[in-house]
Image (spheres, grey):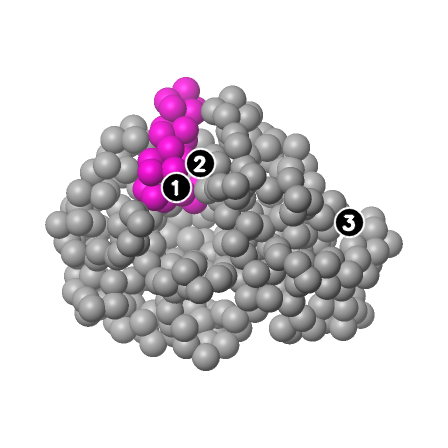
Amino acid sequence: MIYRKLGANGPKISAIGLGCMSFAGFFGSTDDRSSYDCLSAAIDMGIDFLDTADVYGMGKSETVIGTFIKSHKNSFKIATKCGIVAGPDRSFNNSETYIREALSGSFKRLGVEYVDLYYIHRREQGRPIEEVAQTMRKLIDEGKIGGWGLSEVSPTTIRRAHAVTPLMAVQSEYSLWTRTPEVGVLQTCEELGICFVPFSPVGRGIFAQNFPDINDFEDKDFRRNVPRFQEPNYSDNCRILECFKTFCTDNGWTVSATALAWILDQNTTMVPIPATRYAKHLNEWADATTIAFNDAQRAEINRLLPIGFAYGDRYNESQWIGPEKYS
């Protein structure tokens, strides 16, 4: 494992983190034992950065992590999030009162009194981001969080927030088939010394060794409603990706390790957080930090998977509520 800085003044963390959304069953049924085994495997692999949120299983993911770290103290730097008010009519709340209550709940579930990074999961559009930045400054000064971050926001929001209270991290979906952050977000983060954290860097499983069988998706699997995983888009995407899989095999790399290595190759400020609930999947990522592309290989990846190649959007209309659009 190699290590990178979590923002300009943050701690060093593993260059690959672990997204813990899967612990809450977003991509199919899971159990606590599998999640604990996955966390143990992460430690063995040198991964020391976990990403979770209060809304993942309505606290389930945080509770799993909290139970595990009772007997594995100081093994991880932890990032969690708040701001999404769950319900049939999902809404967003970035008020100081809500943020403080949410953080207190996360502390209780995680069994801690401090987290290294605290994100606003979704921006409340009616509230000035400068007000939110001031709230996060108070939490930093009180020693409750090491730094703060934003998720799925525009370059202008990043600049406005950072001018009030410097951001430690910004996260958005980013992978070989989702490259929207290249339209300003990546450049802004690099300029301001903000760590960029790509979530879904292996495309919600599309860059696994074997394509997911969409017929096996459980009713609560998030991907059932994602246009890219629906026909005829899905078959078209798999057809294109077969060539990329052959490229990976020819070079002796797993598909997921290659997808992660591609992200790490973009610049030294990115820390992708692939998500899984199974220890065996971590083994497929193991070589990601050792892959070094030459110019010919970079060009071949760009030829096989040009920007915008994916059929279908990454979210459906209801899932698009919350993320900022900026291009």
Q: Earlier in the sequence, mark 3 or mark 2?
A: 2
The quadrant the C terminus occupies is bottom left
Q: Is residue 63 left or right of residue 200?
A: left
Q: Which mark is residue 239?
A: none
* Corner quadrant of residue 148: bottom left
Can residue 165 be seen here? The reply is no
Q: CA distance from mark 2 to mark 1?
A: 6 Å
Name the foreground residue: 13 vs 259: 259
Q: Magenta segment, which residues?
A: 46-74
Question: What's the amino acid at mark 3?
Answer: Trp
**Mark toward the start of the polypeptide (2 vs 1):** 2
- Find disc 1 in the rendering and name its residue: 56
Which residue is at 42% across, 53% downward? 6
Q: Name the amino acid type tagged 1.
A: Tyr
Q: Residue at x 62, y 64 (%)?
A: 177
What is the x, y in percent for residue 286?
Answer: 67, 41
- Furthest-left residue in view? 97
Q: Position of residue 187 (x, y in %)?
A: 47, 74
Of discs 1 and 3, which sits in the foreground?
1
- The residue under label 2 is which amino acid type? Ala
Look at mark 3 in the image and give the residue it sits on.
253
Q: Residue at x 25, y 63 (%)?
A: 124
